[in-house]
Amino acid sequence: MYNYNTKGVCSKNITFEVVDDKITNVNFQGGCPGNLIGISSLVEGMTVEEAAKRLKGIKCGSKSTSCPDQLSIAIETLVLNK
């Protein structure tokens, strides 16, 4: 289980697992429930590289980041750049 404390967004924490190079069990603590459940469902089973690539750089309003972007940063930091 990976655990990442987010920065600059409404959600405070993201947990997820990687099984056979695929993202699973993504859970955001805080934030907009419907959107974050949707993101979690969409990345379920996606490879770590593909998920990080698709989510990277997405912004939320005037913020320089977003919950999806924070998930990409978590994947890069905890899994890909280990």
Image (tube, rainbow, N blue to C red):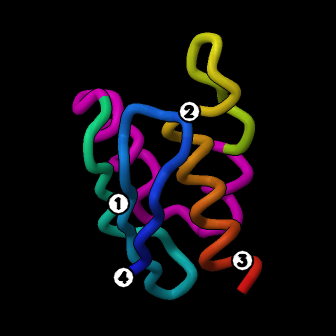
Q: Amino acid at mark 3?
A: Leu
> Magenta stretch: residue 48 in it?
yes
Judging depth in this view, the residue of 50 and 61 nearest the camera is: 61
Q: Which mark is residue 1?
A: 4
**Residue for badge 2:** 66
Residue 18: give x, y in percent of width and height. Answer: 46, 79
Tell me which numbered mark, 2 or 4, is placed earlier along the sequence. 4
Depicted 14 relative to depicted 78: above or below: above
Where is residue 75 drawn, in percent x and y? 60, 66
Label 1 and label 3: CA atoms lie apart by 17 Å
Quadrant of residue 26 in the image? bottom left
- Magenta span: predominant SS is helix
Q: Which mark's residue is nearer the viewer, 3 or 2?
A: 2
| Viewer-nearest residue: 79 or 48 | 79
Q: Residue 19 location, x and y as percent?
A: 44, 84
Residue under numbered circle 3: 80
Q: Residues within 10 Å of mark 2 (few under 14, many from 20)?
A: many
